[in-house]
Structure formats: C-alpha cells, structure tokens
Amino acid sequence: MLDLALFSTTSVLLVFAGTALVIALVGTRMAGLADTLADRTGFGEALVGSVLLGAGTSIAGIVTSASTAASGAPDLAVSNALGGIAAQTMFLAIADVAYRKVNLEHAAASPVNLGQATVLIILLILPVMAWAAPPFAIWGVNPLTPILVAAYLVGLHNAHRIKQQPMWLPRQTNATRDEADDETTDQRSVWLLFAIFMGMVSLVGLCGWLVGETGLELSRRFGISQNVVGALGTAVVTSLPELVTTIAAVRRGALQLAVGGIIGGNMFDALFVAASDVAYREGSIYNAISDRTVFWMALAILMTAILLLGLLRRERQGPAGIGWESVLLIGLWTGGAALQITLG
C-alpha cells in the first residue's frame, strides 16, 4: 500500500502532475479508437461516445471517488464527481471554440444526445433528494443508490431505443455533420481495437487511484478544503481524458462522438456518487456531505439544462463565434470555481 505521508510535498506534486499527463496522453488515443469502433460496429457515434468513450474516460474519476470515500473523505469523493460533470460540460464549450465552422451544438444534432442529456438531469436530481431527506441507510448504503444505478441503465436502454427507432429527427442543414461523413479506414479487428481500448482504460483507472490518493494528501498538507480539492483539483485532472478526446473527436470531424462522449461520460460520472456511497462505511454519504458540495450538484444541473437547450435550439453562430450556451457554460464554471476558491 502506497503511503504518501512518507513522501515530500514536491514528490506528491510530481506524482499528481505525472498522472495528469498520462491521463491526458492516453485519452487522446482513446478518441480515435472509439470513433473507429463506432463505424466498425454500426452502433453510431452518439451511443459509442456515451457508453464506451464516456465510461472509459471516466474510469479515473470513479476510482478517485470510491477510494477517497473509502478513506473517509465524503466531500472530496462527491465533489470530485459533481465537479467533474461541471468541468466536462465546460470542456464541450471549449470544443465549440475549437470548431470554427459553426456552433458545435448545431452541427452535432442527435436525438440520442438529447435523450441522454435529459436522463443526466434526472441522475443529478436524485442525489439532491437523498441529501434533503432524513438520514437512512441499509448496511451503510442509502436506498437511493441502487435506484440511481437503475436509472442509469434505463437511460442507456432508452438511448439504444432512440438510436434504433428515432421518433424525432433533427432538421438537416448544410452545416449538419453526419456520421457517414468520416468513415474509418482502420482495418484491424474489432476485438483487437476493443482490447487496446480496455488496456488504456486500465491504465487510466490506475492513474485515477493515484490522483485520489495524492489529492487527499495535498488537501491535508495545505489545509485546503475537500470541496476545492475535489471539484477543482482531482475532478479537473480525472476529466482531462474528456477534454482531449472531445477536442480530438472534433478535429476528426466526429462531432456526435464528441458531444455524446461528454454527455455519456457525465451520466457515468453520476454513478460516482453511488460508488462512493457503497465505499463510504460510516453511513449514507448523501447525509455526510456539506452544503458546498450540494452547490456543485446544483451547478451541474444548471449547466446540463443550458446544454440541453443549446442542443434543441441549434443556433448556427453566437457571440464570439460560438453558441450562446457555450458562453454561459464557461461563465458559470468560472464563476463557480472562483466562488469556491474564495470560500477556501
């Protein structure tokens, strides 16, 4: 077992930065593999982005949340999850800046992404309800935790149904990007591609554990609150795969994969809270978190609702060459981060 208390502060910071670099580099490769698998399997960019890429790039975060919850740090565990969702939604706005042709939400129109954004709001509201309810746990687990997992699975099934039998279709314009516009030329077998992808997922998961341990140690040494370390430290680092894979997917022209990867990753990130509740052995984790952690829940819900409206409105070009929702998302995350840092 790694005892970081024996390491110097410089060494801990180097481990934290090193794992962040590995996560970012591996994440870049994961986007290309996911895009190829989307074409080769026929499941589509939005669905593969939400399930395979979304869950794969989120593995570091769930390991971080579960390990820190098991260490008795509920605020760090949950704020890592919710801070990650907020940061990743903001990353989509950064990708919108990188895609200069038209507003990303206009070009990446997909009924699957609309459905999953709606499910994500439901997944984020459930922990708020558990936090507001009287403390209750069975064997240390709140009854809402299995409901949260079930809601996620129902959401995935719903996304598959929407993909197979869409009852709503986006209006096609000359700026709408279709999945058929970027067919893959990679002829490696699907199983080989999947095995390579899972190997990368394992590496990212190991890095996620290291991020959680170093983040907890840095919180102790510098006296920084778990909320700040979780929402702005470990959450951003473990979300780096989403940032690099989203920008990489946009550059490849796989726009639905980019948007689906963020929304699907956020859905999976909502399960971090469920995993943290199981790992936290002192009762229901929902009743152990502070109001400042709940703030990140509310911020994530607000940012997701704004993204959903942007996907529905499909504005071609907004202020500063990006969609209005991207401007709001960047502003909300920046404001929320500044507020949490000010509070200490």
Image (tube, rainbow, N blue to C red):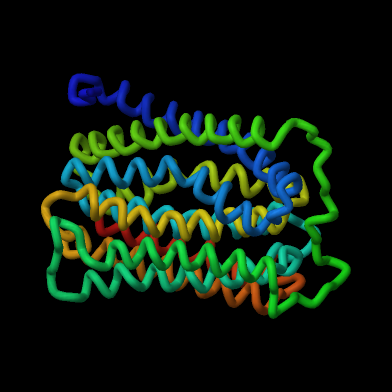
The quadrant in which the N terminus is found is top left
In the image, what residue occupies the spot 38% across and 56% down?
Answer: 271
Tell me where residue 239 appears, x and y as whole percent.
47, 46
- Look at the picture and state if 254 lies above or below 115: above
**In the shown orientation, is residue 157 left or right of residue 291?**
right
Counting every numbered tag in the picture gives 0
Instruction: Name the residue nearer the viewer: 191 or 168.
Output: 191
Q: Is residue 97 visible?
A: no
Quadrant in the picture for residue 294: bottom left
From the viewer's perspective, is residue 332 above or below residue 229? below
Q: Residue at x 65, y 59 (%)?
A: 46
Instruction: For residue 178, say whether it is visible.
Output: yes
Residue 261, image x, y percentages? 59, 53
User: Left or right of 24: which side holds 86?
Assistant: left
Residue drawn at (27%, 53%) of the image? 227
| As drawn, 217 above or below 287 | above
Determine the residue positioned at 42% across, 73% down.
Answer: 122
